[in-house]
């Protein structure tokens, strides 16, 4: 499987990249990034550019891409709905529509978040809900919306937000207990990455995956 990855330098994207590089079924990962990932791997090709929505650097590769994993995201804190819509709905749909025109045979996976709801009261939830609905309507072979709740980073992966890292460091020893107490709300970067790969392999229609579904997919998938 050839993968196109957005957001490879973020916490979620780094987790997905790790699982892609470990998975023997993934032959190539092309990562569009604003800054280098710091990874050096035979499977990985980085395209570093300030505008990750510019697909000209990978245009020739698109017919051979089997799956796109879109892990880019920004916090809604301090943003107006108009600005957040531009950075979330506008950017994601701009990329997805171009990919669907170039290669509708690929699977498209979008990581949004628990609570996403196009009719919800929270601004971020409405914008992400609209984004999900628009992606599900595109003519991809498969389109999958992932809504993880709390994501605990593993294997040295860190968030770009300092206070998140402090919270995650405190949560990590409690992870087994948290997962027993709230199995539908807590997952890890490892399980999320495995689940995304499993969904992309199926390329069978459309789906929305909450945390319980993410863990089920990951645990049923072959271990690398």
Image (tube, rainbow, N blue to C red):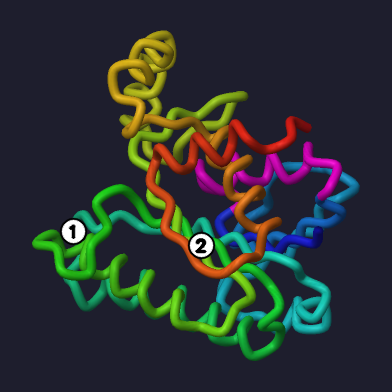
Which residue is located at x 46 percent, y 80 percent? Answer: 93
To which residue does mark 2 refer? 144
For label 1, the SS is loop
Image quarter of the N terminus:
bottom right
Residue 161 visible to an observer of this rendering? yes
Asked whether, in this view, residue 204 is left or right of residue 143, the answer is: right
Mark identifier at residue 194: none
Which residue is located at x 42 percent, y 34 percent? Answer: 151
Bin the neighbour count of mark 1 within 10 Å (Cα to Cα): few under 14, some 14-19, many 20 and up. Answer: few
| Residue extending furthest toward the left | 121
To which residue does mark 1 refer? 78
- Is 19 contained in the magenta span? yes
Front position among marks 1 and 2: 2
For label 2, the SS is strand
| Residue extending furthest toward the bottom | 101
Which residue is located at x 74 percent, y 30 percent? Answer: 223
Q: In the picture, residue 140 is in which quadrant?
A: bottom right
103, 61: nearer the viewer: 103
Tell me residue 131's x, y (percent). 36, 73
Tell me residue 33's x, y (percent). 63, 61
Real-space Cα separation, disc 1 to disc 2, in angstroms: 29 Å
Tell me residue 5's x, y (percent). 65, 60
Q: Disc 1 or 2, which lies upstream in sequence?
A: 1
Residue 87 visible to an observer of this rendering? no
- Asked if 79 appears above or below 199 in the picture, the reply is below
């Amino acid at each position: 499987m050839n993968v196109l990855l957005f957001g490879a330098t973020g916490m979620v994207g780094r987790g997905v990249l790790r699982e892609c590089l470990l998975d023997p079924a993934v032959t190539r990962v092309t990562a569009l990034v604003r800054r280098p990932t710091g990874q050096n791997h035979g499977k990985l090709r980085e395209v570093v550019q300030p505008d990750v929505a510019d697909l000209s650097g990978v245009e020739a590769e698109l017919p051979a891409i089997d799956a796109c994993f879109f892990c880019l995201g920004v916090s809604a804190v301090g943003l107006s709905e108009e600005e957040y819509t531009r950075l979330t709905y506008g950017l994601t749909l701009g990329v997805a529509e171009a990919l669907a025109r170039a290669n509708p045979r690929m699977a498209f996976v979008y990581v949004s978040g628990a609570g996403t709801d196009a009719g919800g009261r929270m601004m971020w939830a409405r914008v992400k809900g609209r984004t999900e609905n628009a992606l599900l309507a595109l003519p991809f072979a498969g389109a999958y919306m992932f809504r993880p709740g709390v994501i605990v980073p593993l294997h040295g992966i860190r968030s770009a937000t300092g206070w998140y890292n402090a919270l995650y460091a405190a949560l990590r020893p409690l992870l087994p207990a948290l997962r027993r107490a709230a199995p539908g709300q807590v997952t890890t970067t490892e399980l999320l990455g495995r689940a995304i790969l499993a969904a992309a392999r199926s390329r069978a229609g459309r789906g929305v995956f909450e945390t319980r579904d993410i863990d089920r997919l990951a645990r049923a998938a072959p271990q690398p």
